[in-house]
Amino acid sequence: MAIKADPPLIRRATPMLTWTAQGRSIVKPRNDSYADGDRLRWRQNEDRLRLARIPNGLLAAVSDGAGGAGLFCGPWAETLVSRLPKTPIAGVNALNQWMDGFCLGFRSEYAALSKATPARYSKFIREGSFATLAAGWLVHRQGRVRLRWMGYGDSQMMVFDRTGRQPVLATCYPASLSALDRAPFLLNWKDLPHDSGFHAGEMVLPDRATVVLASDGIGQYLLLRTLAGQPRPAAAAGLAGEFQRLSGTGESKLATAARAHRATPGPGLSAELTDLRDCLKSDQAFADRVRALCGKGLLANDDCTLIMIDVDLARPR
């Protein structure tokens, strides 16, 4: 099942600025089933995304419902992205106040839906629903495009600077590979968000930039492809140093993935971004791309959600 942004493609142009935003979401390539009482259920896509126009800009968001625990994680992820405000959430207190507006309503609605099955109702009340959230607000003002973003959990945000001959990773969230190697913080309607789980930032975008928001599997893929294509640093520092250590002696799943990327030559970052951008043009193209990458061992078998926003700002001569 594919979930498209509504609308799946946003184009906007002014005399000086052009931007194009696309998003797709699909269930894991190798789907699986589980027993629910005497019924066999196939797992559904728990990811959700949103692309929407806001005054002078765009709102983009990805939420990854963590279906390994709790219940109704997909609807909870849908609630998070659909209720995002048109102005940035600036801190954990603002995040908590925003969630206060709909948590009890979500609990009441889905408690009623599960009450006919005591075991499901008990699990829902006891564990709640889990999801990540990564959101970005892009606004064009005074001749520049400013990005303000927030993240909670391991859904990812990356900004690529395309002003040079080759794209360069300008910033990313999470900011370290070690953060992707740990169990993520997750938002739950029954719990207060943790201060240490909330991250936010802002930046003025380069004149030519690509902003990416992604669920953890395909976001990790793009980050590892980016790092695998860079020269090995003489001094182990930053993301490049982390990648060097992980792909050398690391023993985690992320380390195994890093070694697979290091051993697989790629077409280069510019071509990689172009391939991902092109596959977002249809559900089938995105599904085929994800399936192929998963088959090569470069992408985890997981629900995949990807948003790409290309910003091109012309300067007066």
Image: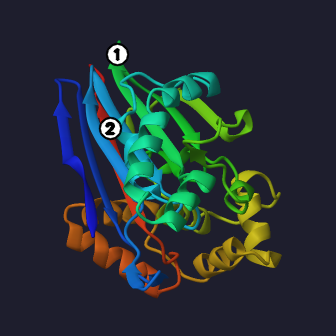
Q: Quadrant of the N terminus?
A: bottom left
In this orientation, does residue 163 appear? Answer: no
* Lower sequence index among marks 2 and 1: 1
* Secondary-structure class at tag 2: strand
Image side of residue 41 versus residue 241, left or right:
left
Q: Amino acid at mark 2?
A: Val
Q: Which residue is mark 1?
A: 141
User: Which disc number belongs to residue 311?
Assistant: 2
Give the distance between the C-alpha atoms of the residues marked 2 and 1, in whole angstroms. 14 Å
Q: Quadrant of the C terminus?
A: top left
Residue 82, by quadrant, is: top left
Q: Nearer the viewer, residue 153 or 238?
A: 153
Q: Nearer the viewer, residue 154 or 16?
A: 154
Question: Is 37 above or below relative to 281?
Answer: below
Image side of residue 306 versus residue 279, left or right:
right
Could you say where residue 87 lies in the image, as x and y percent from the top left? 41, 21
Could you say where residue 28 lies in the image, as x and y percent from the top left? 41, 75
Image side of residue 46 versus residue 226, left or right:
left
Image side of residue 239 versus residue 309, left or right:
right
* Secondary-structure class at tag 1: strand
Q: Amino acid at mark 1?
A: Arg
